[in-house]
Image (cartoon, rainbow, N blue to C red):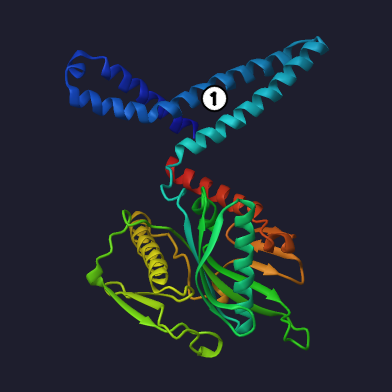
Amino acid sequence: MLDRLQSLADRYEELTAAMGRPEVASDYERLQELAKERASLEEIVFLYRRYRETDAEFDAARNLAEEVSDPEMESFAREEMARLTEKKDGLTQEIKRVLLPPDRRDEKDVIVEVRAGTGGDEAGLFAADLFRMYSRYAETRRWEVEVLSRSESGIGGFKEIIFEVKGQGAYSRLKYESGVHRVQRVPLTESQGRIHTSTATVAVLPEAKEVDVKVNDDDLRVDIFHSSGHGGQNVQKVATAVRITHIPTGIVVTCQDERSQWKNRVRAMAVLRARLFDREQSRQDREITETRRSQVGTGGRAEKIRTYNYPQDRVTDHRIGLTLHNLPGILDGELDPLIDAVSTNEQARLLEEQLG
């Protein structure tokens, strides 16, 4: 990393020298081009220079501690070394932050889709547990949660639930939750105490505004029908449920929770825009790297990103090999230790790619 930073500092000096040349100063467009590049390097070069100065001070303090015979001076030098080490660590984190390209989606609100995977009724109950987990986590962050659409199973679970999370930095935190989640526990309906394995899939989509995604009305097929309750019976006399099909992509969104047809349509369009935005972002990501994996697979047990094991009171994130023994707390929304670890690992990976 230091070699990379030195090359950036050298480039900064080259740009500064070039902008001072008469032939460049008289060429407005060229001057603006160089000034823009120089400005983009200014923060990282400033941090690097502070790091070098701090490192030099640390070396001086270490030499003093090794050379002096006065115990009081040696103690002072070692205290100074400890202070400078902490300062260097802080600067290193700042440098890493600046080196990483920002994700312009991080400050967006999100639409989260949780679906029962393999495991029958137990998978539906697990989907409901995940919804509660994310709702509780949102509460701790003072984010707003609004259910957009749900399809309930007969025993209190969800076949599917789609909800919106509004709040500062919602996508920056929840984006790491996308994938297949696996649960291992004894279902309430299991009379012999056998452990069952079930899954649910989670997709976290950055909410897209109309300015992000243009949807042509001619590309939509809108169907209006009666909302259904448990068992498929119609629960309203007036048809208010909305199903929107985006003909070019085949994406279908259904919303029926509201009693107003207009509100259901607004919600369905929000989900559709989010899915189209995510589809386009995924396409761009695949063009940049062929190693990017799809957010959600088929829901099979082998595609898991995280396992929630009840008998052993553990949660394991398989992407980073982290296991925590606080299952009740995590299911009650204490997700920060998991999200922080995955985020740190991902930032390290991105930094390695950047420096490479």
Q: Is residue 355 above or below residue 216?
A: above
Identify the residue at image location x=39%, y=77%.
242
Is residue 318 shown left or right of residue 330? left
Q: Residue at x 72, y 63 (%)?
A: 327
Q: Residue at x 47, y 36 (%)?
A: 98
Where residue 12 sits in the image (x, y, percent)? 36, 24
How far across and down, in percent of the image, does residue 331 sit? Answer: 68, 64
Does residue 232 lie above or below 341 as drawn?
below
Check the image and name the residue furthest to the right: 71
Q: What x and y, as percent, mark residue 193?
A: 78, 84
Label 1: few (<14), some (14–19) or many (≥20) C-alpha neighbours in 10 Å: many
Which residue, as the protein is rendered here, is positioned at the far front?
Answer: 237
Label 1 secondary element: helix
Q: Which residue is mark 1?
A: 51
Camera sees residue 356:
no
> Residue 81: in sight, yes or no?
yes
**Foreground residue among 60 and 115:** 115
Residue type at tag 1: Tyr
